Amino acid sequence: MTTTTATLGSTLRSGFQRWQFWLLLLVLGLLSVALIQSLNDEDMDRFGLQNTALDGYAALAGVLEDQEVQIHSAASAEIARDLMTEHPEAPLVVLSTGDIPEAAFSEGLRGRDQRPVVLLSEGPELLGALYPEGPASYAGNHPGGGSSAALEAGAQCPVDAAVNAATVQAPGALFFSDAPGCFTGFTEDTGAAQMLIETEAGLLFGGPAAFTNQNITDAGHAALALWLFGAEDDLIWYTPMGLDTLDEQQWASPMDFLPDWVIPLAWWLLLCVLVMMLVLGRRPGPVVGEPLPVQVPGAETAEGRGRMYQSANAVDASARTLRSAHLIRLARLLRLGAAPQEASIVDAAARQIRRDPAQLEGLLARQPRSNSELVAYAQALAQLEDEVQRAALNPHSLAHPAGGARTGLGAEQTSTDRTHPNRQQGKNTSND
Amino acid sequence: MVLTRRFLYVALGLSAVVVVFPTPGALLGCAVLLILLAAADMVLAGSPRSVRVERVPTAGVRLGQTTTASTVVHQEGARPLRGQVKDGWQPSAGARAQISPIRLGPVRSTGPGGSAAKIQTARIQTALRPTRRGDLHSEHLSLRSIGPLGLAGRQVTHRVRHTLRVLPPFHSRRHLPSKLQRLRELDGATAVQIRGAGHEFDSLRDYVRGDDVRSIDWRATARRQSSQGQHLVVRTWRPERDRRVIIALDSSRTSAVRIEDEPRLDSGMEAALLLGALAAGAGDRVDYFSFDRGISSQARSGMRGDLLHQMAEAMSTVEPRLVEADFSQLPGQIRAISSQRSLLVVLTSLDSGSLEEGLLPVLPALTQRHLVVLAAVRDPELDRRARARETAGEVYRAAAAERALIEKEALRRQLASLGVEVVEAAPHQLPPQLADTYIRLKASGRL
């Protein structure tokens, strides 16, 4: 039993480890999508003033802005009321996309002042909220758009805007009214009804779809829009939301929908978490320390000195040090004894690699002035040492000394020459 | 107090009760039930206090080897004890499974008088693979006793110390057979080049090319004249035995420097162990000591037991100390060990600062009486840095490395002028090279 559990657990663990990267990638991907979604504040609402999609009002808002009409948006009745107080002359547009204004606001609309009001609604809700029992009523839906005939303003139309617009060709609502209206259409059930009627609360237009980005250029839509909304410099644009109609009493806590046992269970699980902390947090014994030994990295002094050379730009000192180091090694390579003269080292080295001693002297006497010169100098020294080393390892170079190198024969030269056969002999002896 | 995972699962299981009866009363009831269960289990658990912990001494082990540390737990309580035990080894002891289960029966009285009690015992074994040299400890043993329900229990920590001595690894052991072989070849097989009063005549043999012509025994050659021709006969000399070799290991601040993958002190230990084993094998008397401000460890071949083991034991606890070595005490310490001429091997660093002020002033006193060999670890990193010449930064670092190498070279010459043999090699090369130097000195009769 235990074995099975362990196997299952280990299988899960190894599976998780194998897919860890992809799982992580998936989670990251989901998180980034969610983040992008949450950061995206583009207006996607139907008939939204910033919505640039086909069903948006961005074109209308843009044109009105060009006409120097400033649109004040209000998302709630409270804001709308404040704006109305702020701009007493500004026309009010109430655009209903299914939601209705709160009762008090509707009441205020019915007993309105001289402010022009345009009510936009493609359904019966707004009218129902304003006049539950007449004098006007919802007649039905007008299919509009496409092949269906445009609605004429009609001879009896009392609204200048509608007369100037002449026709609309958009889907929407038709209303019955005692007073004459405009854009008469025919529903299947009830016969003739108007898309634009005058009520006490204001003009009620049943085809807000006419002003969308898609339809604004059709028929007389643009003219109607400009006549309706472009009369004043300020325009209050109120779009009722569902929240407006909810009273404080109507607010429901999500807790109300939860089963009774959730709260006690949450408390109990909290207790379980505490227990888990106690269970897992209990150490099986005291913490054990490890007395660590002292250790210092090896080349620390050299590293520190190198940094100091660099920060002080010690080109001269570095060049001198490198030169001395190479001379010492060359002397050892050429077996020139304990403390040979520099000239003898140069001579011996030049002979070894068949170069002009003056050239080597020139190289050694070079005094670098900048970092790049120092690097070149250091590399040239290293190369010289490599060449001498190669020549010393290759016995043929000793057998045929170059004629040119013999020009400056001195005491050191003869002594060096004498050294070579000895060395050769010594080698032979040891090989025996 | 200890709560187990089972307690947590029971608590989680009780959430079903909370779901079925979602009242504060049920919640409280469940909590009280849990507390009661835990309390009962704790009370019924065998007392972890009424046991006696006995640590079984563990033999020293070389670094890199594995061993097992044993602890015996004796039951002295009346109730059975069931649970876990944790041995508190320090991390570098490399304990594989520190927590092991334990089950002890109750102390039962066998006779009617109850005088003869049978004590139950349990042996806890912890497999160890130490990763550090020195004395490693387990300061305590924690005993967790779980109740019969397995929900809760009690835990007590018994502070009884357990010590494991970890000896130096002695990796250079692999060089020992070949070096001993060379010593044996040397023994009576070489015509030594320097004749001295102290050299013991060994045998006569035919001359071979390379032998010192001065060692030809003309009288014996005359006796070997035959019809085939002339046979030259040389005398051979047995290298000296019973010489004294004193190994001084510097454990001061310079030994804390890590070169390649180990501190200078450890490389020095390897070299000292190989040299000690070799010299003891060659019949010399070996004395070892490490020093910083005073002597920190000591071993000698006169002591009981194997010298190599003695040295390893003595070295095991030596750690580098961040103090300057006091070389001025060295002559006195050497004098206390031996008054006769000895081979003195000082394992330190060729660090101009510490040597110029410390060792150089006392060297004449030492070289006068003894043959001194100075063995030091060479840092290959310096050579690598000296060769890197690609960028300005590298060249500056190369210059700094070259400067360090020049200083070392100057120091070597100074030491050589004082008659000191200097052996400087990379960490892994130092032990065989020091051994070679010893063999060379022995072969040339300079010991």
Image (tube, rainbow, N blue to C red):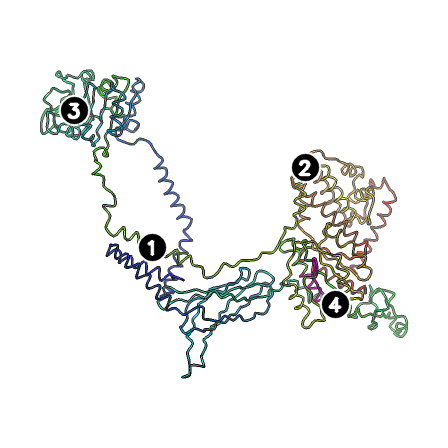
Residue at mark 3 to residue at mark 2: CA–CA distance:
88 Å
Asked if disc 2 and disc 1 are in contact, CB closer than 8 Å, the reply is no
Queried whether the magenta region covers residue A85, the answer comes back as no
The residue beneath circle 4 is: B183
Give the amino acid type for the residue marked by disc 3 in the picture: Arg
Q: Nearer the viewer, mark 1 or mark 3?
A: 1
Q: Earlier in the sequence, mark 3 or mark 2?
A: 3
Using the image, determine if residue B271 lies above or below residue B121.
above
The amino acid pointed to by label 4 is Leu
Mark in front: 2 vs 1: 1
Q: Is residue A188 visible?
A: yes
Observer-nearest residue: A191 or A267?
Answer: A267
The quadrant holding residue B76 is bottom left
The residue labelled by disc 2 is A312
Q: Amino acid at mark 1?
A: Leu
On whether disc 3 and disc 2 are found on a single subunit, the reply is yes
Label number found at residue A103: none
Q: Quadrant of residue A250?
A: top left
Find the magenta span and give its range.
B269-294
Answer whether labels 3 and 2 touch (C-beta < 8 Å).
no
Left or right placement of residue B88 versus residue B1 in this view: right
Letter of the chain that mark 2 sits on in the rendering: A
Q: Nearer the viewer, mark 4 or mark 2?
A: 2
